[in-house]
Image (cartoon, helix red, strand yellow):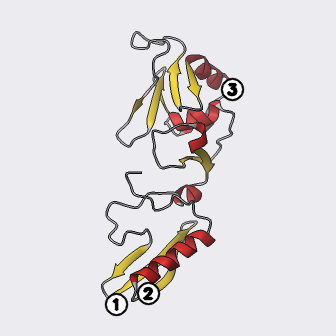
Amino acid sequence: MTPEQVSALSENELNFIKNCISYDQYTGIFTWRSPLSKNVKVGGIAGSKESQGYWVIKIKGKRYKAHRLAMAISGFEIDNNQVDHINGKRSDNRLCNLRLASHSKNQQNQAIPKNNTSGVIGVYWAKNVQKWYSLIKLNGKTFNLGYYSDKNVAIEVRQFSEEVCGFHKNHGRSASA
């Protein structure tokens, strides 16, 4: 089972997990309820942060992403949805910071890529025409929003399109947010 397959848990498995760990929805912290190994202390923090920033908990040799466990333990049906960290902090597993989202909706709440040079997602300098190019992606399709001599106009067009298309207000935040 991969960390993303929490939705495939049977009711018995989920009940077993609930007996092993406790989840505080206000802090987002998981603690051990029962000692599963000599390294586990009752009341100790369960899991660890991985290199990508997600908190992962290992139970009986299986790895679970904490944000998905938080939703499952809280009674949400994950099904084929992703769990989005609203504020973009992958280790912040407070229930108020998590929401179920399709892949497309989750992409509408991402940080600005580190290699972005315009300062805004979807706005690029097009060398071949010496203008700013604006685009937006929806449901896997890319839509051309036009070429502009003025960078600020290209940004305004992109931001207006995000609003009309229902992008999350955090979309385009700095990567360190």
Which comes before the other along the chain, label 2 or label 3?
3
**Residue 147 — which label?**
2
Q: Is residue 111 above or below residue 153?
A: above
Crowd tier of the residue under label 1, counting other residues whose Cα lies within 10 Å: few below 14, some 14–19, many 20 or above: few
Q: Position of residue 115 (x, y in %)?
A: 31, 64
**Residue 92 — which label?**
none
Indicate the secondary structure of the residue bearing disc 3. Answer: helix
Name the residue: 60% across, 32% down.
25
Could you tell me how far apart the alpha carbons at marks 2 and 1 are, in whole angstroms? Answer: 9 Å
| Marks 2,1: beta carbons within 8 A | yes
Could you tell me how far apart the alpha carbons at marks 2 and 3 are, in whole angstroms? Answer: 53 Å
Crowd tier of the residue under label 3, counting other residues whose Cα lies within 10 Å: few below 14, some 14–19, many 20 or above: few
Occupied quadrant, residue 163:
bottom right
Could you tell me how far apart the alpha carbons at marks 3 and 1 are, in whole angstroms? Answer: 58 Å
Which comes before the other along the chain, label 2 or label 1?
1
Q: Position of residue 78 (x, y in %)?
A: 64, 42
Q: Which residue is mark 3?
A: 11
Q: Which residue is mark 1?
A: 129
Whether residue 70 is visible here, answered yes or no, is: yes
Q: Nearer the viewer, residue 54 or 161?
A: 161
